[in-house]
Amino acid sequence: MVKLLASVLSSLSAICVLFASSSSAESAWDEWHTDGGSPYDFVIVGGLSTGGTAGLALAARLSENPDQTVLVLEGGEQPDVVANYRTPGAALNLLGTVIDSGFVSIPQVTLKDRQITYHRGRTSGGSSAINGMVYGRGSSSIYNKWQELGNANWSWTDVFPLFRKSTSFLPQNLNDMDFFTYDPASFGNGPVPLTYPPWYPESSVSFIEAIGAIGVEPVQELTLGTNVGIKQIPNTITSDYQRSSSYNNYFEQAKSRPNLELRMLSQVRQIILEQQGSNFVATGVVYTDLAGGSTRNITAKKEVILSAGCHQTPQLLMLSGIGPQEILSTNGIPIYVANPNVGQNMQDHFYYSINVRVQEAASTEFLINDISRMQVAGQEYQQSHTGPLSYPGSGSTHGFQKLSKGELESLNATELIGSREDQAHIEYYWEPTFFPLLPTPQYAPRKNESYFSLTAGVLAPVARGNVSLQSNQIIDSPAINLNYMGAETDRRIAIEAFKRMRSILQQPQIQQWTIGPAGGEVSPGPAVQTDEEILEYILDTATTAYHAVGTCQMLPQDQGGVVDDRLRVYGVKGLRVVDSSIFPVVPDDHIMGPVYMVAEKAAIVIMEDWGL
């Protein structure tokens, strides 16, 4: 074992290498023993939780070369330990189960010190195994911006073929309807199946008709680079209407390959770094076999690849001695590569809703209110994979609105003018239930009543959050600071979106479904009118969209990057990151599609770099 000697930081703003004391490094090695068998060419790491959405897709692609051995270390269990996990309508029932990490943020100063629960998959396939199955890509300008920031070959022209490569569209009988549309040019013959469920609440059509009142019009397709308009969004479900995660769509097709292995219940503790000359090289990882309790190390002949997600990838880097000097020192972690940018620049969408009491036919609340009808729906899905449980529980009808330059100027959104103009700024999300599934300060949903919710998301957040450490142990979740609405621009756009939601809800297409005074609005209700009152309501109720990105951003080193445009971690050879943490700018859409794209891109650059 190479002895690591202490040195001094040359600059907090630059990446520099520091050497830890040899005694701390060598004593840690005393606990480890080498696994039997040969090393692997590529070791893909999911940290505490998962092999990840991107990780399993990447493993499948790399193992297409029979001469390359690939190991995926998975911290959780298989998703089928939870009954009905592939039932679209049961998606919300997966939250809080054994396949959900269920992180909790630190108290959020910007949200009145509330703590936000952040669900993410702790199972094969990562969050693609528990999410809402919503597929999107975002605007072409986002990826062009990635390239403008110094990332060669990441423009829309470069990545669009990879979006196509990863997906295939499965036409269904409903596709001839006005809002169940698609453009075959947007999809290829890839492993990720996209289609529409065979059942939908009638009120979703009313929403599509009503949103025209604020200038959002129906479009045929939202995945060709123009993410403005409204339509039914395709879901990652199979032709027989079951959830499709990266475990189902990528890994199951590849798992019989002798050069590919997935180890479950393998909790990665840290990356093994060795000094070779003046550089550090990632030569493997240390992990705990949760089934047997032993701690092991495994060697990577070519690369260690982190696919632990936006929260745990930076956590694992920091636990391995790669990150901000102050955080590492505070937690007693030897500093090998000091990079103050690890864990910073976190961007995420946040959601908040207006809740409306409606007739039963406009909602899916009957699945909660009436056990007998729930049983009937369960039997129908079990027999034919149709009916209400074939429909994703959180809804799939979305509108995306771009604010004009004049509108941005009127909102004093100066940070977006010029740099983030050509994209959607607000998402309107139709949910046939009371969302979020918690009482608000104004109202608690009542048994035997039905609701739907109109939800808004701010898609170009200015505020940045961060991820830090609570301890020097992987068993402790990372310290997550979301910082939602930490910028005045975000608050102003959120208030404006709230007002526009009210305009939509006042349209006759919506009012035909409502019950009670104030157009059926129960939360926040008609007492909330002024900008100050609206903001208070949003601060009381806003929650996450689970679209966190950017904590290991892909940028040039001197501009705050953690990885380069080939996803290599600065300061360490043989170490890459392949997940949403590398996004330098959050897309104006749900991020599962971009994550699959990044996995496809990573497979190409890795094989190029190794001449495979």
Image: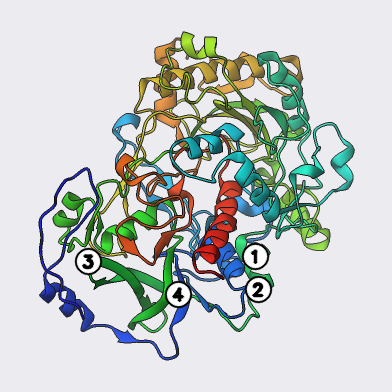
Label 1 sits on what residue type?
Answer: Tyr
Q: Which of marks 4 and 1 is in front?
A: 1
Q: Are marks 4 and 1 in contact (CB under 8 Å)?
A: no
Q: What element carries label 3?
A: loop
Please tell me how crowded label 1 is: few (under 14), some (14-19), or many (20+) other residues with Cα within 10 Å.
many
Q: What percent of the width, then of the height, locates residue 217?
A: 73, 22
- What is the CA distance from the residue labelled 4 to the residue labelled 3? 35 Å
Label 3 sits on what residue type?
Answer: Ser
> Residue 529, can we see it?
no
Q: What percent of the width, then of the height, locates residue 65?
A: 61, 75
The residue positioned 39% from the left and 42% from the top of the image is 116
Q: Are marks 4 and 3 in contact (CB under 8 Å)?
A: no
Q: Is mark 2 on a helix, strand or loop?
A: helix
The residue that label 4 is drawn on is: 265
- What is the CA distance from the residue labelled 2 to the residue labelled 4? 20 Å
- The image's mark for residue 254 is 2
- What is the CA distance from the residue labelled 2 to the residue labelled 3? 39 Å
Q: Is residue 3 above or below residue 122?
A: below
> Residue 461, can we see it?
yes
Q: Nearer the viewer, mark 2 or mark 3?
A: 3
Q: Nearer the viewer, mark 2 or mark 4?
A: 2
The residue that label 3 is drawn on is: 278
The residue positioned 14% from the left and 56% from the top of the image is 329
Please tell me how crowded label 2 is: few (under 14), some (14-19), or many (20+) other residues with Cα within 10 Å.
many
- What is the CA distance from the residue labelled 3 to the residue labelled 1? 39 Å
The residue that label 1 is drawn on is: 250
